[in-house]
Amino acid sequence: MAELATIARPYAEALFKAVPAQGAADVAAQVGVIAQVAAHEQVRQFADNPKVGAQQVFDLIATVAKLSLGDAAKNLLRTVIDNGRLAALPEIAAQFHALVNARSGVSDATVYSAFPIDATQLPQVVASLEKRFGRKLNVSVVVDPSLIGGVRVVVGDEVLDTSVKARLEQMKVALSA
């Protein structure tokens, strides 16, 4: 994995420098979609076939993506295909997304909840999490019944675990010590 990260970094940084700040979120979304397509095993097998040309691979990915790609996303896709780095495209997308978030002061957060969070409660939860972590958050919610109750929040490498499962684990450790 470290090798893919090393390969992806120059592509992500070059794209980041080439895209204006106001259009970066749109480009990140486009690159994310083409990265999902490129991650498919069948697409990789098609691209690795020596009888298939770079334009055919580009056309396949652009067609399957089902969205209008901007010049930046098209240029990145062509460059990655021409250099034989299609396997690194998902990592390029992840690194580019992280650079865009860093520039805007936003972090991605995943909230694992034992129960679905109501749409009316979510803004309150997000506001309290933004206050707790001291930055703007892009929140996605994942329902995980194994937590029993409460939430577990992951923001980058920071974790806030207020779940019943975590508290039971803490009690187990305290009682067995």
Image (tube, helix red, strand yellow):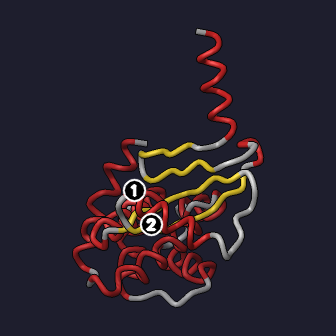
The mark found on residue 137 in the picture is 2
Q: In this view, does 100 lie above or below 151?
A: below
Q: Residue drawn at (73%, 51%), measured in percent from left and top?
A: 114
Which element type, helix, strand or loop, lies under badge 2?
A: strand
The answer to whether residue 85 shows anywhere in this view is: no
Q: In this view of the protein, which residue sits in the foreground, 59 or 51?
A: 59
The answer to whether residue 31 shows anywhere in this view is: yes
How many badges with numbers are in the image? 2
Q: Residue drawn at (70%, 64%), measured in percent from left and top?
A: 117
Quadrant of the image containing the N terminus? top left
Q: In this view of the protein, which residue sits in the foreground, 61 or 168?
A: 168
The mark found on residue 133 in the picture is 1
Q: Give the amino acid at mark 1.
A: Phe
Q: Give the amino acid at mark 2.
A: Leu
Q: In the displayed image of the protein, which residue is found farthest to the left?
A: 17
Q: In this view, does 123 lie above or below 43?
A: below
86 on left or right of 140: left
- Quadrant of res 36: bottom right
Quick check: marks 1 and 2 in contact, CB under 8 Å? yes
120 on left or right of 9: right
Q: Residue drawn at (62%, 85%), measured in percent from left and top?
A: 66
Q: In this view, does 29 lie above or below 126?
A: below
